[in-house]
Amino acid sequence: MNVVATKVSLTVEDIGASSRFFTTHLGFREVESGNGYVCLRRDDTSVEIALSERDPELPPRPRKGQGLADLVVTLTVTDVVAEHARLRREGAAVSGRIHHEPWGEQLFRLVDPNGVVVQLTEWVPPAGAPEHR
């Protein structure tokens, strides 16, 4: 298998609100849009985020405890501390402080207006640990 691109497709209630969140706070730009659909991309990665409205012909959404338990869009960054400070200054819905994992990952989460959870993470190896890529 040769993966040439990655796209995360999210169904949201308000496409405009999520699009503004990703473009304003996370550096994405709209590269394609149509009726009930927006595709976002950053220039420094091949990952795309597609936002679409819920298809009314699909069955109703599962209730809590059914379907996917959690969905988190994770973006690996180079300076999670600076990003945390910037996003708090911008008024983004940052959930708490930076969390440090014992294996060297530093992370925090924020939530877009439609409830999409985005995690920003950075690998900071503990002393004596091998470099992670």
Image: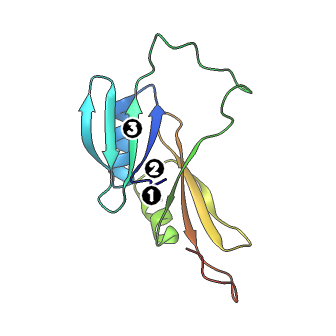
Residue at left offset 52%, top offset 70%: 81
**Under tag 2, what secondary structure?**
loop
**Under tag 1, what secondary structure?**
helix
**Nearer-N-terminus badge (2/1):** 1
Mark 2 and mark 1: span between their CA atoms?
5 Å
The picture places residue 54, in percent across and down from the top left corner, at: 45, 21
- Does any portion of residue 43 appear in the rendered image? yes
Residue at left offset 48%, top offset 41%: 112
Question: In the rendered image, which residue does mark 1 sit on?
Answer: 87
Mark in front: 3 vs 1: 3
Q: Is residue 78 left or right of residue 20?
A: right
* Amino acid identity at mark 3: Ala
Mark 2 and mark 3: span between their CA atoms?
20 Å
Q: Which mark, residue 50?
A: 3
Determine whether label 2 and label 1 are within 8 Å by CB: yes
Q: Is residue 36 left or right of residue 59?
A: left
Height in image: 118 above or below 97? above
Determine whether label 2 and label 3 are within 8 Å by CB: no
Badge 1 crowding class, 10 Å Cα cut-off, few under 14, some 14 to 19, many 20 or more, is some
Question: In the rendered image, which residue does mark 2 sit on?
Answer: 92
The picture places residue 101, in percent across and down from the top left corner, at: 71, 68
Farthest-out residue, bottom: 128
Mark in front: 2 vs 3: 3
The picture places residue 95, in percent across and down from the top left corner, at: 59, 51
